Image (cartoon, helix red, strand yellow):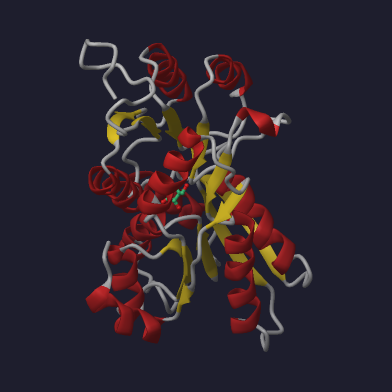
Amino acid sequence: AGCGGDGGSGGSADDGKITMGFSQVGAESGWRTANTKSVQDSAKSAGVDLKFSDAQQKQENQIKAIRSYIQQKVDVIAFSPVVESGWDTVLKEAQSAKIPVILTDRAVDSADTSLYKTFLGSDFVEEGRKAGTWLTEAFKDSKDPVNIVELQGTTGSAPANDRKAGFAEVIGADPKFKVIASQTGDFTRAKGKEVMEAFLKANPDIDVLYAHNDDMGLGAIEAIEGAGKVPGKDIKIITIDAVKDGMQALADGKISYIVECSPLLGPQLMDLAKKAVKGEQIPARVVTEETTFTQEQAKEALPSRQY
Ligand code: AHR
């Protein structure tokens, strides 16, 4: 690429190299750091010229970055939308400029699905269902109400909306499961700790914490220990992601169960991007393969965990 002669522009490549503009959500979690590394490493090995920007969890920064990629005439734009709504205008601008867009990790709620070529990422509703299924199994013999607190991800984001919905769908089948408090912890450790402290003050009788990611769960563990309770015993914890620190807490018995969400999207993204630029047909949806971990499984998996 770089046929514009200014060294920075994309455009169709005479050297076969494509230019990708990638707008990342931020660096809010261990998952995100691993995702960024995966995208950057795979771009390098796939020979993709990557322009990368970190939006610091702000939609306006992502819109700015996408507009600048359009101006630079990159060959393809990929981004992980911080929230689901509000993308139509900028996506239409990319479409008018004939630049294919790939949604990575998170979805948008645009009714017009022709605004992007494909969506590569996890099934977040299914992740929430898996968390709920473990919980209903673990408490199947309990006659008492099960008091649950929930730490939600970033408000308005696809993983927060979907993980909440999938979990609620499964536990909703039995009225003994009660979500007594649910609030956002922004997918960060610091906010997870802060909100859990407030939950503990307001609710003396919490049985279960469902955190939409490991980082918030890890912050909450500090709050639980600070309140003189034992995570994993007094309060069972379920999280999503399976990053190393989360897996360590699972192996240590502090977390009870983790639903995996894989951040290693880079290789598939580069492959889809090359095809999209060539105008080849690509599937409208590519779902990431992932598993779940019990405490025993975490001990086995930890030594070879990549992130
Ligand atoms: O969109 C994926 C989610 O975003 C991860 O589960 C979370 O850790 C990250 O911040």
Q: Residue at x 66, y 34 (%)?
A: 109
**Is residue 253 rendered to the left or right of residue 303?**
right
Image quarter of residue 241: bottom left
- Whole-percent x, y for residue 236 in the image: 48, 73
Q: Along the line of sight, which residue is nearer the eye, 303 or 96?
A: 96
The N terminus lies in quadrant: top left
* Image-based side of 230 in relation to 201, left or right: left
Label total for image: 0
Quarter holding residue 180: bottom right
- On the image, the x and y values in percent for residue 53 come to 31, 28
Q: Is residue 181 visible?
A: no
Instruction: Please name the residue shown 31% across and 83% down the image.
Output: 299
- Which quadrant of the figure contains the C terminus? bottom left
Return the residue nearer the eye: 273 or 255.
Answer: 273
Residue 168: x percent and y percent? 69, 60
Compared with 164, 76 (above or below) is above
**Residue under the point 31% across and 25% down:** 14
**Residue at figure coordinates x 69%, y 64% from the top left:** 178
Q: Which image quadrant for residue 207?
A: bottom right
| Residue 119 appears in view | yes
- In the picture provided, is 4 more to the left or to the right than 124? left
* Residue closer to the observer: 123 or 57: 123
Position in image of residue 201 (x %, y %): 47, 54
